[in-house]
Image (tube, rainbow, N blue to C red):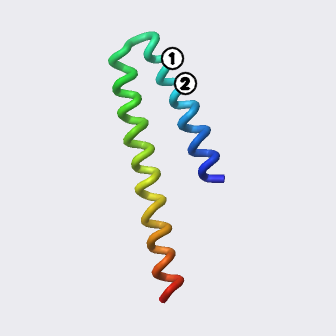
């Protein structure tokens, strides 16, 4: 479910970025940069949860 939510969010954000690109190209760069940071943050916070879950299971 989380992956579906993330994918739908990225699609919606991508469409939003394209809409801004028609208005102001430099704004699209800012938005896409923020989207990349958000995507990296989501992946970063998802990875430690999985890694921390594995040691607890083994221990």
Under circle 2, the secondary element is helix
Q: Position of residue 36 (x, y in %)?
A: 40, 39
Q: Position of residue 35 (x, y in %)?
A: 43, 36
Q: Is residue 35 toward the left or the right of residue 4 in the image? A: left
47 versus 10 height, above or below: below
Q: Residue at x 35, y 24 (%)?
A: 29
Label 2, on which residue?
15
Q: Residue furthest top?
A: 23
On residue 55, which mark appears? none
The total of numbered circles placed on residues is 2
Q: Is residue 53 toward the left or the right of residue 4 in the image? A: left
9 versus 55 height, above or below: above
Mark pair 2, 1: CA separation: 6 Å
3 versus 21 height, above or below: below
Label 2 crowd (10 A; few <14 / some 14-19 / many >=20): few
Q: Residue furthest right?
A: 1
Label 1, on which residue?
19
Q: Residue at x 51, y 28 (%)?
A: 14
27 versus 52 height, above or below: above
Q: Position of residue 8 (x, y in %)?
A: 61, 38
Q: Residue at x 37, y 15 (%)?
A: 25
Q: Residue at x 57, y 45 (%)?
A: 6
In which quadrant of the rendered view does residue 30 lie?
top left
Q: Position of residue 47 (x, y in %)?
A: 45, 62
Q: Is residue 48 toward the left or the right of residue 57 in the image? A: left
Decide: marks 2, 1 in contact (CB < 8 A)? yes
Label 1 crowd (10 A; few <14 / some 14-19 / many >=20): few
In which quadrant of the rendered view does residue 44 lie?
bottom left
Under circle 1, the secondary element is helix
* Of the pair 23 and 7, the residue shown nearer to us: 7
């Amino acid at each position: 479910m989380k992956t579906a939510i993330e994918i739908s969010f990225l699609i919606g954000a991508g469409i939003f970025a394209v809409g801004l690109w028609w208005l102001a190209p430099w704004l699209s760069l800012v938005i896409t940069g923020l989207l990349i940071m958000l995507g990296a943050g989501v992946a970063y916070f998802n990875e430690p949860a999985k890694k921390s879950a594995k040691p607890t299971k083994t221990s």
